[in-house]
Image: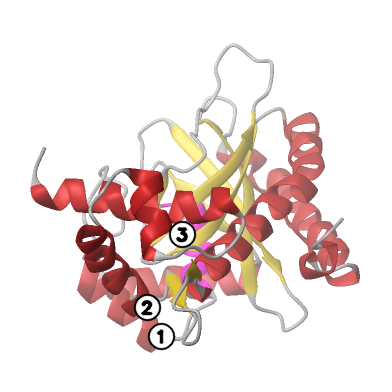
Amino acid sequence: MSENVQSVERALDIINTIVAANRSLSVGELSQAMGLAPSTIHRILQTLTVKNYVFQDPQSKRYDIGPEIVDISSALYLRYDLVRRVRPYLQELVEVTGESAHIAQLYGTTAMYLSQVEPFSMVRMFTTPGSIAPLHCSDVGKVFLADLPTARVDEIVRKTGLPARTPQTITDEPALLAELLCVRSQGYALDDEEREVGVRCLSAGILNGARKVIAAIGVAGPTSRMSRGRIEEVSEAVIGMARRCADELIRQPMAELVGD
């Protein structure tokens, strides 16, 4: 095991030990609980403190969970709660369209799938929760890009490029910007075999009270079923479901559910 990997493991063990104790701990207590020298514990704690993963009380000199861990926990709670509350809408989308339904959020310069509900048909589209998709050639990704200022889109394109995944992938920035104008105008984004040949996907944005996209909800299916002739019908279902999700989340924001 490399020294870097060992240091990471020990840092995580320190955090887990503090969490399990449910109270602040001294260097000595951490040393005894983990079987490591106090000097080793202290060295790792210094790094964790700088990164705000742990906090040292200036009077007692004991260590507790820091604000960064609290922020991560809150973000994960909200993500879990979003999936829980949107899942019935995903199930309804499956019933209405007969295709796999998914929800995703923006994750840096990619889109991350949070959940998927599958139909009972023989041919199904599998999207593993936690998997990521490029923004420029996925339906969910285009939803997020269309919600961003052009300057931010340009910044992302310069960082990630526009690599071709299929012959249908948009690899030219002016063409991508024109596509995003269409997304804003029509209210949905289409992946027309741009990420995988034989697969067509369509998504719409779930908006918050400030009219900003917080997630994308949509469906995916083989082109044999998700024909171009079905796009209008499917887009109406997806847009309608996205609006219903948004209405519920605006009526009762997720933050209000903490402690339920």
Work out whether residue 40 or residue 181 is closer to the camera in this orientation and state it.
Answer: 40
Q: In the displayed structure, would residue 41 be above or below residue 175?
A: above
| Residue 63 vertical placement versus 12 (above, below) | below
Quarter of the image with the N terminus is top left
Quarter of the rendering containing residue 157: bottom left
Residue that numbered label 3 is attached to: 141
Toward the viewer: 12 or 40? 40
Return the residue nearer the eye: 39 or 180: 39
Of the two numbered discs 3 and 1 on the same chain, state the one appearing first in sequence.
3
Distance from the alpha carbon under mark 3 to that under mark 1: 15 Å
Q: Is residue 46 magenta?
A: no
Label 1 sits on residue = 150
Q: Amino acid at mark 2?
A: Val
Q: Residue at x 40, y 41 (%)?
A: 193
Question: Label 3 to label 2, Cα distance in Å?
Answer: 11 Å
Q: Is residue 252 left or right of residue 94?
A: right
Residue range of the region highlighted in magenta in the rendering: 137-146
Instruction: Please tell me whether residue 144 belongs to the stretch shown in magenta.
Output: yes
Describe the element under mark 1 as helix, strand or loop.
Answer: helix
Question: Which residue is at 27% across, 67% downward?
Answer: 42
Disc 3 residue crowd, few under 14, some 14–19, many 20+, Cα 10 Å = many
Residue 20 point in image, percent of width and height? 56, 48
Residue 173 drawn at (x, y percent): 28, 73
Disc 2 is placed on an element classified as: helix
